[in-house]
C-alpha cells in the first residue's frame, strides 16, 4: 500500500506528541527531585513516594474516569459523560493523531496537577489519604476544570478563553488546590512561632532541587510546544522560544530582585523564579510575542518572591512554594493572555473583553479546584485523618510511613574514606592535604 | 532534487528511531542512579563506573561483534556470520531506516543487558573482570539470544515467538544472567547470618534510586514504542499507553500489597513494582489491550515482591533486585503474551499454542544466558578472580577499586554552615530555629 | 488547504530540531550536576546558580544581541550587524526551518559555552561578575567566533573550515576562555603548596557528577545529530553512531590508561574521558567513518588525562577539568577533521590543506576567546573584583554568596534513623544488623 500524504502527516504529529508526552512525563521526576530537595531529608523519601502515587494510582484514575470526564461527550458545558477507559467515540475532538497519543499526552498533564499539591502538603500529610486525593485529583478535580477550558464544548472554551498549555487549567488548578490542602492540613510543627516569627526549615539538598528544576524546564519543551498536538503547526518553534525566554526572564529577575532586596541572590528564588516564568507563559506561549514573553516571565519572577512571603505571612505553610509558583503565577499567566495576546490582548486591541474572559475563566477553575480540594481534604480529615502524629512528624515521614531513612550511611563512608586516606592508601592526598583544603 | 514521499517516510522513521535511541541510552543513567542509590555509599561510585564500562567497553563490543552475531546473515537459526563493525550487507533485515539508525537503537539495548547484571553483582565484584564480562555480554551473550528472537532467520523468530521490545530477549536474558553471576560470586559479607536470618544492608540514597526509576520510566517511552522502528506505525501511540498503564499498575499494586502485608508501603518495592510492570509489558506492549496491560503490570507488581523474598530465601544475594525485576518479570512478560495477545493469546483464542512457543522461547534464551554467564564467571573466578578481598569489601569498592570515596565532605560543609548560622551571618534563621525545626 | 510535500518536510525538520534543542538545553542540567559533583559541597550550590545564570541572563543576552552578531548580515566576515531580538531578515541563512527553531537550537549552544567556563572558575569567583561574564559570553564572545565558523559569510566558513557541531566554535572557545579566566582569577586557596606539590580538593559527590555525565552524553544525541538541522538528512543516523563510538572509545581508553598507569581505573578520568571523546568528535561527527570516530575518541581519552596533569603542573587550577576536556580535546577534534575527514582529510587525500585550514580556524577562535575573556576578566578584576575574600573562600561560596548551605541535615536524619531502628520501630533490621553490614 503506498504511503499517503495524510499518513505522513499523522505520523509526524504522532511522533511529535509521543515524544512531547515523554518529556512531560519526565517532569514527574523533576517535581520529585525539586520537592525532595527543598524539604528536610527525614521526609524526602515520602514526598517522592507521593509523586510515585501520582504516576501510578493517579494515572490509573485518569485512565478509568478522568479522561472521560475531561474529553467525553459534553453535558451542559460542565463535564464529559463518555469515554471511560479510553473507549467509545471521540470524533468530537477532531484529532489529527490517534486517540492513544492524545491520551498519553493528557495523562502526563493530569498527573502533574496532583503532583503540584504533593509539594505543598509535604512533611506532614499521611500517605494513604494522599493516594485517595491523588486518585480524585486525576479522576475528577482536574478533569472537570480541563473540560471547561479544553473540551470543545466546555463552557469556558465556548466563551473564548485562551489557555494554550494550561497556566489556568493545570497550574492555577494545582496551585489553588494546594492552598486548600494546606489550609485544611495546617502548618508543619516548628514552622511558625507564637510571637509571629517563622523558622526556616532548611532545604536538605539544594543541588537535587536544582536538578529537578532543570528536569522540569527540559520537560516544558514538551509541555508547551507539544500542546499544539501537531508537528506541522510551525508555530511550535515560536512557542519553544517564548517558553524559554519567559523562564530566562523569570530567573534573571528573581536573581536581581533578591540581590537588590536582600544583598544576595536567593538560590531557592532563582529556581522558583525560572519555574514561575515557565508557569506564567504556559497559557500565552502560542499567543504572545517573544518580547511579551520576557515581560510575562519577568513579572512572574517578582510575583513569586512576593507570593512566597505572603503565604508565609498568612501562615499557609507550603514547603516548596507550590502555591506561589503554580497558583499565583498560573493565575497571572492566564490574565497575561488578556493583556499580551497578539489577537485580542488589551495592549493590541485596547479591549478588556479577552482579559475579562480570562479572569472569569481562571477564577472559575481556581475556585472549583479550591473548593473541591477543600471538601476532599475535610472529609478525609474527619474520617481517616490526613496528618501524621506530632511524634511521627518530628521523627520524619520516611520512618513513620515507610520504615526506612532516605539516606543511610553517607557520612560513615566518608569517615572511613578519610581514615583510609590518612593511613596512606592513596598517597596522592594525605589527610592533612584534605583538611588544609577545607 | 524534489523530495519524495519515500524520503519523507524514511526521515520520519529515522527521526523517531534516533530520538528513541537517545531515550533508551539515557536509561543507562537511570540504571546507574537506581543501582547506586539502592546500595551502600561505599560501593556507589564503583557500580556507576561499571555502568560506564557497559556504555564504553560494552558499546565497542557490540560494534565490533555483537551486532554481527545478532543481525548478520544467519547460520542455522543460531547466530549471525556477517556484519562486524557495521559493514557488509544487511538487506535481509528489510529496514526502512538507515542501518546506522538501527544500530544505535540496538546498541542501547545491548548495553542495557550488561547493566542489568551490574546491579546484581554490586558491592563485591572486581572492576577488571566486570569489564571482561560486559564486553562478552554485549558481544556474545545478548547477541545470540537476540538473534534467536529478533533476527528474521532466528529459530525462535521462525517459530513465531512474539517479544516486541524484549521482555525475553533483553530482560529475562539480563535477569537470569544476573542469577548465574550471583551464584558464582556468592553473597555479600554480612548479608546472611548463620542462623538463617538476613541483614538489611541499607540503601544509602533512596532519592537517587527513585530519580533513577524516573529516568528508566522516561527511557521506556523510547524502549517500547521505538521498537516499532517506524514513526508511521501509528500503533506506537497505543504502545505508549500500554507501557505506561502497566507501570502504573505495577507501582500501585506493589504499594497496596506491601501496605496490606507489612502495614507500610515499601519504597523500594514501589520503585521496583513500577519497573516490574514496565519489564513485564515490554514483550506484549504492541500486542495487548490497555486493560490487559494493567493486568500484566499488576501481576508483576506482586511477583516482584515475592521474587525478591524468594531469592533472599535461597541466599542469591541481589542488592538491587535485578533478578526479580528483570528475570522473573521478564519471563512472566514473555509468557503473558501467550495469554493476553489479541492475536493468538489464550484468552482470545483458547489455544495454548502461542503460550507454548513463548514458554519455549523465554526458556531457551534464559537458559542460554544463565549457562553462558555461569561459564564466563566461573572461568574468570578460577583465573583472575572475580571478587575483592574481604577486607576490601568491608572498606568498600570505591576505595579499593578507585582509591576515592563517592562522597567527601558533605557533612563537613553542613557543620560549618550551622556554625556560621549560629554566629549570625544569616539573621533570618538562627541555630535555635534550625534545631527547633528538627 | 491540502498539506504539501514541502510543508511535511519543514514539519519533520522542525520537530527534529526542536527536540534536539531540548536535548541540548538539558545538557545545562548535566553540566550543573557534573560541576557540582566534582567540587566541594560548600561551593556546590553556587556553581549550580552560575549555570542558572547562563540559562537565564545568558539566554537573554543571546536573544538581545548574540544571535544577531552570530547570524546577522555579515560585516567583513567578522560579525553580524542585523537581527537583534530575532527580528529582521535572515534569508541569507537559507534555513529550511522556522527562524525560531533555529534560534532555540543555537541558544542552547550559546548557553553551553558560558557554562563550560563556570566549571573552571568554580569555588572562588564571585556571582555578580560571573553574571556579567555570562552575558558577554553569550552576547559577544561566542557569537563572534560562531560567526566566523558558521555564518555562511564568516571568514573561516569561506575558507572551508569544517566544524560540524562545534569542537572549535563551542568547545575550544569555551575551553580556552576557561584558561584565560583561570589565569586571571588564580588558583583556589590550598590547591598548590609552596614546595610545588598539590592537594586534592576532593569531589564531594561523584554519583552526582556521573549523573551529570550521563545527562551530557544524552544531550549529545541532540547536539551532534541535531546540527544537521534536518530530519531528512539521513546522515543523522551515522552522526549518532560516530558520536557514541567516540564517547565509548574515550571512556574505554581513559579507564585502561589509568589502570595501566596508576593501577586503578580513575573515576573522574573515565567520566571526563567519555566527555573528551564526545567533544573531540563533535567537529567531525558528520565527516568521519565510525572507525575514525573510535580513533578520535580514543586519542581524546588519553589527551584529557595528560592535559589535566599539565594544567595542574602549570598551576592553572581548573576544578572540573574544563580546559582539558573542552579546550584541549575541542582543539584536537577540530584538527582531527583535517586528518580523518572522508572528504579532504590527510589520510584520504594525502593533502595537508584541510588540516591547515582547521588549524588556522581553531587557532583563531581559541585566541579570540582567550583574549576576549582575559580582557573581560581583567577589567572586572580591577573594577568590581572577581574573587571572594579568603575567609569567604574557606567558608564556602554557598554561605557567603547565597547565605545557605547546599545540604542541611542529611546526617541528622541518618542518625535519627539509626536511633529509631535501634529502638525497634523496624523489626526487620536491628542496629546490630546495620552496623555489622558496614
Image (cartoon, coloured by chain):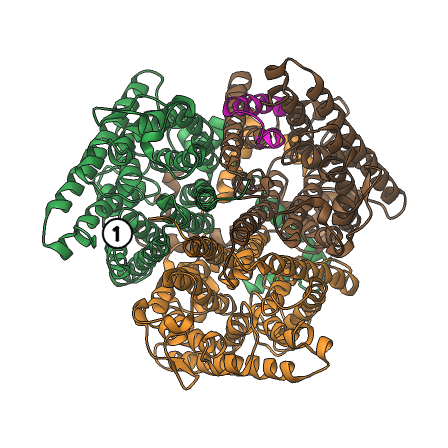
Chain colours: A brown, B orange, C green
State the predominant SS element of the stretch in magenta. Answer: helix
Q: Who is closer to the viewer here, C328 or C432?
A: C328
C294 inside magenta stretch: no
- In this picture, is C25 found above or below C438? above
Please, which residue is most extreme toward the bottom here? B76
Report the magenta residues as a range: A278-305
Q: Position of residue C388 (x, y in %)?
A: 39, 25
Q: Position of residue C153 (x, y in %)?
A: 24, 31
A287 inside magenta stretch: yes
Q: Position of residue C201 (x, y in %)?
A: 36, 43
Please, which residue is most extreme toward the right here? A382
- In this picture, is C89 found above or below A88? above
- The residue at 30%/69% (across/down) is B87
**Label 1 neighbour load within 10 Å: few <14, some 14-19, many 20+:** many
- In this picture, is C323 found above or below B431? below
Give residue B436's quadrant in the image: top right
Image check: A86 left or right of B426? Answer: right
Tell me, yes or no, if residue B136 can be seen here.
no
Q: Who is closer to the viewer here, B348 or C179?
A: B348
Q: Give the letter of the chain under mark 1.
A: C
Image check: C246 left or right of B334? Answer: left
**Can you identify the residue that label 1 sits on?**
C287
- The residue at 51%/66% (across/down) is B119
- In this picture, is C169 found above or below A355? below
Give the SS element for disc 1: loop
- Total marks placed: 1
Amino acid at each position: 500500500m503506498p504511503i499517503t500524504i495524510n499518513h505522513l502527516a499523522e505520523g509526524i504529529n504522532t511522533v511529535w506528541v509521543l515524544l512531547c508526552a515523554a518529556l512531560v512525563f519526565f517532569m514527574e521526576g523533576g517535581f520529585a527531585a525539586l520537592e525532595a530537595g527543598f524539604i528536610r531529608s527525614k521526609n524526602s523519601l515520602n514526598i517522592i513516594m507521593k509523586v510515585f502515587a501520582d504516576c501510578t494510582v493517579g494515572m490509573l484514575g485518569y485512565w478509568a474516569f478522568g479522561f472521560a470526564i475531561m474529553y467525553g461527550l459534553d453535558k451542559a458545558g460542565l463535564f464529559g459523560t463518555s469515554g471511560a477507559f479510553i473507549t467509545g467515540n471521540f470524533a468530537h475532538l477532531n484529532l489529527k493523531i490517534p486517540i492513544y497519543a492524545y491520551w498519553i499526552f493528557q495523562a502526563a498533564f493530569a498527573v502533574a496537577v496532583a503532583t503540584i499539591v504533593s509539594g505543598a502538603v509535604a512533611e506532614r500529610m499521611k500517605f494513604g489519604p494522599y493516594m485517595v486525593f491523588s486518585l480524585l485529583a486525576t479522576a475528577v478535580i482536574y478533569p472537570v476544570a480541563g473540560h471547561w477550558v479544553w473540551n470543545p464544548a466546555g463552557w469556558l472554551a465556548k466563551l473564548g478563553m485562551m489557555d494554550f498549555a494550561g497556566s489556568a487549567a493545570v497550574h492555577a488548578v494545582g496551585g489553588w488546590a494546594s492552598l486548600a490542602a494546606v489550609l485544611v492540613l495546617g502548618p508543619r510543627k516548628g514552622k511558625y512561632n507564637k510571637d509571629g516569627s517563622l523558622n526556616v526549615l532548611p532545604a536538605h539538598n539544594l543541588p537535587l532541587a536544582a536538578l529537578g528544576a532543570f528536569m522540569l524546564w527540559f520537560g516544558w519543551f514538551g509541555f508547551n510546544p507539544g500542546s499544539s498536538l501537531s508537528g506541522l503547526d510551525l508555530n511550535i518553534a515560536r512557542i519553544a522560544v517564548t517558553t524559554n525566554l519567559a523562564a530566562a526572564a523569570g530567573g534573571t529577575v528573581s536573581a536581581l530582585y533578591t540581590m537588590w532586596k536582600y544583598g544576595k541572590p536567593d538560590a531557592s528564588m532563582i529556581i522558583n523564579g525560572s519555574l514561575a516564568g515557565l508557569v506564567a507563559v504556559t497559557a500565552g506561549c502560542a499567543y504572545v510575542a517573544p518580547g511579551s514573553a520576557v515581560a510575562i516571565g519577568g513579572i512572574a519572577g517578582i510575583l513569586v518572591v512576593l507570593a512566597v512571603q505572603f503565604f508565609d505571612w498568612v501562615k499557609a505553610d507550603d514547603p516548596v512554594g507550590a502555591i506561589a509558583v503554580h497558583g499565583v503565577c498560573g493565575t497571572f499567566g492566564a490574565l497575561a493572555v488578556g493583556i499580551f495576546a497578539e489577537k485580542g490582548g488589551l495592549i493590541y486591541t485596547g479591549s478588556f473583553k479577552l482579559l475579562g474572559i480570562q479572569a472569569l475563566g481562571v477564577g472559575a477553575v481556581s475556585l472549583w479546584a479550591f473548593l473541591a480540594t477543600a471538601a476532599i481534604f475535610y472529609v478525609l480529615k474527619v474520617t481517616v485523618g490526613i496528618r501524621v502524629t506530632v511524634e511521627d512528624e518530628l521523627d520524619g515521614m520516611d520512618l513513620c510511613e515507610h520504615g526506612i531513612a532516605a539516606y543511610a550511611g553517607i557520612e560513615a563512608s566518608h569517615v572511613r574514606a578519610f581514615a583510609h586516606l590518612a593511613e596512606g592508601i592513596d598517597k596522592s592526598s594525605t589527610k592533612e592535604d584534605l583538611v588544609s583544603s577545607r
